[in-house]
Amino acid sequence: MQGATGTGARSSAPTLEMVAREANVSRATVSRVVNGSPKVSPEVVRVVNAAIAKLNYVPNRAARSLASRTSGAIALVVPEDTTRFFGDPYFAAIVQGITRRLDDSEYLLNLLLSTSDPNRKTVRYLRSGVVDGALVVSHHEGDHSLHEAAHEMPMVFGGRPPNIADDDIFVDVDNLEGGMTATERLIAIGRKRIGTITGPLDMPAAVDRLAGFRRSMETAGMSADAVEQADFSVAGAVAATRRLLDREPDVDGLFVASDLMATGALAVLRERGRRVPEDVAVVGYDDSPAATSSAIPLTTVYQPSEEMGYLMADLLLRLLAGEDVPHRNIMPTRLVRRASA
C-alpha cells in the first residue's frame, strides 16, 4: 500500500501494528491470535506469540472487550460541531447508510461529536472498552489522536484521512475526478471566468476537489486563480462568495465544493442581481437534498453518500468478525445536470 506514515505522536508502548510488522502478518491476524480464534494455523500462532513476547505487547482494555464482545456497540466519531452535523444533509445520508447496515447486526451505534477535544476525551472513551470499534467521518488534519486509537481498535474512516498510514481503512470517492467533472461542465457550456468556493483545506476532500478544479482549468488554458475558501457551511459560503465577487466581478461560472454551500452562493448571486444560469452558471457537489430544494435546482457531482455509510459499517463489522478487508475503497461519482448549469 502507498501512503504517508506521519500520523502524529505515538505512544511508546508496543501496538498491535508493531506486533503485526514483527511477525510479518496482518493486524487482523494478530487480533485473531490475541482473541484465541481457531481460524489461525498453529505455525502462525507460534510466530505471532513470539513477536508478542519479544515486544512485551499487552492487549488493551478495548481489545479485551472485543475478545469477549461485551459492549455490543460501535462509535460514530464526527469531529464537527452540532450545527454542522445536523445542518448538512451529507451526514444524514452517511448515518442512514450506517444504520441500514447495522440493522442486520447486534451492534448499537454511539454518536460522538467532538469539534475541539484538547483533553482527548474522545480517544479515552474509545480506548475504555465501551465500544468494539469506530467509524470516523469528516476527519481534519489536526485530529492526530484518532490515528493513535486506530492502531489499537478496529476503525474505518469515511473519506481519506489526512496523514494517511498504510493500514488505515477508508471509504471515499475520487474527489480529484469529481472536481474535474464539475469544472469541465462549466468549461463545456462556454464559461470564460470560472471560480470556485472550496471546503476547509485541512480536509483531503476539499484539497482534492480544488486540485481537480485547477487541473481542468489549466488543461483548458484558463486561469485558476479565482478561489475562495469556506468551511462546508452556508454561512461560510456566503462570506466566501461575497469575497470572490468583490475581487472577481466578471465571474460567470462557479464550482462550489458542496451543495449546501452552493445554496449560500445562490443567495449571494441573487443579492448581487446576478441571474443563474444566464449570468453565472453554478455546479455543486454531493447531489444531496439541498441540490433539489434550492430555488434553482443545482447541477452537481453525485457521490453515493448513503452507500458510503453502508460500506463503512460493513467493513467494520467484517473487521470485528476477524476478516481481512480492503483498505482503500473508492466509489464512483457522476455529473447530474439541472437548471443551474
Image (tube, grey):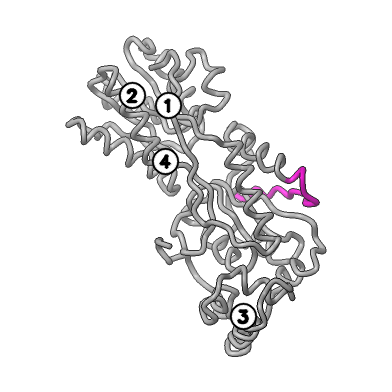
Q: CA distance from mark 3 to mark 1?
A: 48 Å
Of badges 4 and 3, nearer the viewer stands: 3
Label 3 crowd bin: few (<14), some (14–19), many (20+), radius 10 Å: some
Check disc 3 and report its element: helix, strand or loop.
Answer: helix
Residue 175 numbered tag: 4
The kind of residue on which mark 1 rests is Leu
Residue 266 position within the rendered picture, expressed as x and y whole percent measured from the top left: 44, 19
Whichever of labels 4 and 1 marks the residue nearer the N terminus, that label is 4
Q: CA distance from mark 4 to mark 3?
A: 40 Å
**Camera-nearest residue between 122 and 35:** 35
Residue for badge 1:
335
Magenta region: 102-114
Residue for badge 2:
185
Query: Would residue 77 appear left or right of 235 to someone viewing this image?
Result: right
The kind of residue on which mark 4 rests is Asn
Instruction: Residue at 36% x, 31% y: name it.
Output: 181
Q: CA distance from mark 4 to mark 1?
A: 13 Å
The kind of residue on which mark 3 rests is Val
The kind of residue on which mark 2 rests is Arg
Whichever of labels 1 and 2 marks the residue nearer the N terminus, that label is 2
Residue 222 position within the rendered picture, expressed as x and y whole percent measured from the top left: 19, 30
Residue for badge 3:
44
